[in-house]
Amino acid sequence: MKSEKLSSIGLSALCRCMAAALLSVFMPSAYGQHTRSLNDGIQSVRVIVDDDPVLPPIARVGGHVAISFDAMTHEYTRYIYKVVFCNADWSANADIFESDWLEGFNEQPIEDYEKSFNTSVLYTHYWLSLPNDDLRLLLPGNYRVEVYADEVEDGRAVLEACFSLLSPEMSIAANILTNTDIDFNQRHQQLTWTLGYGRRNVVDPERELHTVVVQNRRCDNAVINLPPNIRNSTGVEWTHRRELVFPAGNEFHKFELLDVRRVGMGIDRMVWADPIYHAVLFGCEPARNYGYAPDANGAWVVRRSGSDAADTEAEYVVVHFSLHTPRLPGGDVYVTGQWDNGFPDPRCRMTYDEKLGAYEVGVMLKQGYYNYQFLQLDDNGLGHLERTENSFFETENEYIIMVYHRPQGSRYDALVAYQRVLSGK
């Protein structure tokens, strides 16, 4: 690690980053699960189930859910959390009493917090676990935790953390095909899947069921409530549906920032530019051919070398991304990963440098392991990888299927089936 003048690492990118690094404004989507910061002083909002940071935020009823975030100051703030029971579309459920889905007391203070130790950027790490001594969640379905400073009635939430609880009463069988309705072993993958009702009584599947299919936890291209094309008394099927053909994309890039004084995987050089460290990643370019490279399908994990307390000892670092390609026609290019929870983040929008022939951006991130890709958004907010990463049928992707059931007369959407499928497995 060395100190350099800012111009040598991209002054314009740094200025954009420092102006926006603490501000997150997100885009709407039909798929509303959205863990996010709503305040310019809140970073690194995470939802971890069963102590595995790579898993989707879906746990069985009674399972363990951990929510954490960083407030970018050493000054203590009294935060209150409020749990909201949601419908399948993530709107608040106003048809059911709180006592039906919650046992205990809602709107409680977050009592666990710790200041960062020996870091250049000061922050305070807060966390809470569910269930806890104050609160237990009873029903399967979607939950949103809203966090407020001081009192719920005093203002809007500073963050939202979303997760789902599952009661596995129906079964899913799914396959990923590269012989698709569009092409054969070229640029796409097609999902076919079957839902078995089990002991659930389903009279009208199109009215009672709410289905969600997500590729690599992206919200922009999620397939919501696609009607099944095969129906019988024991279940329904989705087969040869063009709507379930997805561009295969390419494997994620990755970097690992464990020590701010040494370069790690994917990092070209480390720079100290007072008052913050900078990590300049190796430049990327659209792939010409497929090359297998193990990844975590967009996941990120907070880590720091030699520390068992990375949550409070990890540094915040400006990470500089670059995509070397001629200027692309169409929409803006973003760097994305699961740190944006499926919604391209304005602070991750890249700008084109004519002299370097590359898209660039600097984003402030917490030390750890990261996967990332470059996504181009069209005018409808749909992301495309074909020009930025290329698309290969061999790519390993994660597909998540979720099924909610609201039988006639019920007042809530119960999450009754969930399947995580990896292509190529």
Image: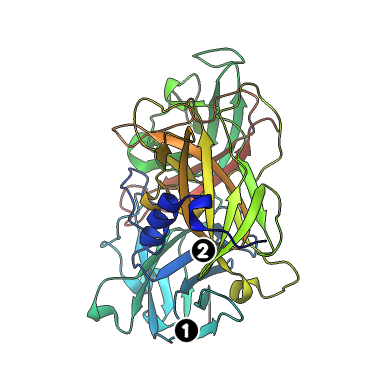
Q: Nearer the viewer, residue 48 or 170?
A: 48
Q: Can you see residue 202?
A: no
Q: Which amino acid type is shown beneath numbered disc 2? A: Arg
Reply above or below: 161 against 245: below
> For residue 103, what is the image quadrant?
bottom left
Q: Nearer the viewer, residue 236 or 126?
A: 126
Residue that protrudes farthest toward the left in the picture: 154
Residue 289 lies left or right of residue 213; in this view the side is right
Residue 112 lies left or right of residue 17; in this view the side is right
Real-space CA distance between mark 1 and mark 2, rounded to the nearest whole angstrom: 20 Å
Q: Quadrant of the N terminus?
A: bottom right
Q: Position of residue 281 (x, y in %)?
A: 60, 47
Q: Position of residue 59 (x, y in %)?
A: 56, 59
As helix, strand or loop, the secondary structure at mark 1 comes to: loop
Q: Which residue is mark 2?
A: 46
As helix, strand or loop, the secondary structure at mark 2 comes to: strand
Q: Residues within 10 Å of mark 1 (few under 14, many from 20)?
A: some
Q: Earlier in the sequence, mark 1 or mark 2?
A: 2
> For residue 144, what is the image quadrant?
bottom left
Q: Position of residue 104 (x, y in %)?
A: 43, 81
Reply above or below: 308 against 366: below
Q: Which mark is residue 74?
A: 1
- Residue at 39%, 81% (x, y): give it: 79
> For residue 38, what is the image quadrant?
bottom left
Q: Nearer the viewer, residue 330 or 296?
A: 330
Q: Which amino acid type is shown beneath numbered disc 1? A: His
Q: Position of residue 350 (x, y in %)?
A: 42, 43
Q: Residues within 10 Å of mark 2 (few under 14, many from 20)?
A: many
- Residue at 54%, 28% (x, y): give it: 191
Q: Nearer the viewer, residue 274 or 51?
A: 274
